[in-house]
Image (cartoon, helix red, strand yellow):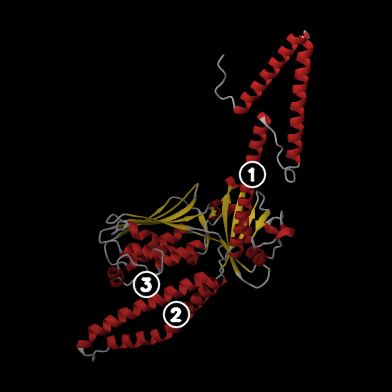
Amino acid sequence: MKLPASMSTIGWQAAYRLAAAAVVAFLLGLITGRMAWCFALVFGLYAFLQNWNLSRIERWLRFRRVLPPPDMSGPWGEVVAIVSRIYRRKQFHRARVTELLREFRRLTTAMPEGAVLLGPENEILWLNGRAAEWLGLRRKRDFGIRIENFVRHPDFIEYLQTGEPEEGVIVHDVGHGASRWLSFHVVSTDAGMRKLLIVRDVSREQRLESMRKDFVANASHELRSPLTVITGYLDALAQDDKLDAAWRSPVHEMRRQAERMSLIIDDLLELSKLESSTPNHDQPVDVGGLLTLLRKEAMQSEQGTKRIDVKLDTDALLLGSESELHSIVSNLLSNAVKYTPENGEIELRWWVDSDGAHISVRDTGVGIPAEHIPRLTERFYRVDEGRARSMGGSGLGLAIVKHALQRHDGTLRIESKEGAGSTFTCDFPPERIVPRSALKEAVNR
């Protein structure tokens, strides 16, 4: 009979011992003539020994921290050896995990950032010392309590619930200790069951940004007065019939550059105003009428043969600031006019779909290389430095568009192909759409 190949050494030893006991019982039965009694006696003794060995092993397993392994032979000795190896391996891994945990705690304590491990209900499971200091938490007392009970800022609570914006949220003065700016960013783990909240102190960066904004605003404001004086003298010189002919060209160039500087200062002041003022966007704006008005203004100022069309796919209104929406579309339309050649086409479109409301400015101009598109909304960024300067642009138009859109919860999409024109699309969320019928009902009431 062929036994299974998977049979262990302990199984073979037990089988041999059981067979030996059977042989002994059989021989004793032949000698005494009491076969049944001999088998009962031998197997009873065999069972007693097995039970005794089992009791010794059970006692050792119960008190193995203080008792040495029992000295046993045969199958039970193999069992004791295997259990001892498993126990030693377990002790090794436990010591290793303990050391890794201590090292992890030392590293998290030395981290410049705070870290808080949150459970499914945003309850605190663990935190490092930096997070405890900044958020006013105590490790043992506050475990199991929801993080919203300690950081009650509405922007932070909305970020925890929605996960937007993806880059995290910055909160000023969470109410614990000194006034500071804290950046919160959540990293999900375990399929969303646990979340790691990373906390950074960005007070220095925020103070520098505030200083930069104040400097730009103050410098732009202070430069406006002397520039106005310079422009006035240049205008007077240009209109003076007695001016030497050799100076007429330089004076004309100085006037052009002064006008460009004035445009840059106006754009800097507008950008500073967008960054520093509180949004107030609760007025329904007739986007269709706004696009029609901007087309009319562009056609009056444009001396070429460019064609500008307005396509209105909806009569809905948009909840926002009319002046800022005017600035958004005006900057996009101005760029389209500048970079569209003669006999080119420009289209202004307004439509609504399931994703929200959209305003697009499409042109058949020179287009933009793909590598430049991600940086177009940076301040003073230019695709073609020489061409942009010759056309008198400030390099701030798209930065203004970006900031004004953010104040309307909107985003800017840019689609362009070099030599085949560009499309700039402003996307607004559905909650900013106001049906014209709803506005009429409100007026009738």
- Along the polypeptide, which appears first: circle 3 or circle 1? 1
For marks 3 and 1, give the CA distance: 73 Å
- Along the polypeptide, which appears first: circle 2 or circle 1? 1
Measuring 65% from the left and 47% from the top, which residue is drawn there? 91
- Badge 1 is on which residue? 88
The secondary structure type at the circle numbered 1 is helix
The secondary structure type at the circle numbered 2 is helix
Residue 393, how many percent across, how many down? 34, 71
- Badge 3 is on which residue? 394
| Crowd around label 3: few <14 · some 14–19 · many ≥20 (10 Å) | many
- Badge 2 is on which residue? 220
Residue 175, how many percent across, how many down? 68, 68
Reply above or below: 423 against 61: below
Say what amino acid the circle numbered 3 marks: Ser
* Direction from residue 123 to residue 220 in the image, left or right: left
Q: Quadrant of residue 418?
A: bottom left
Measuring 61% from the left and 71% from the top, which residue is drawn there? 180
Which numbered disc covers residue 162? none
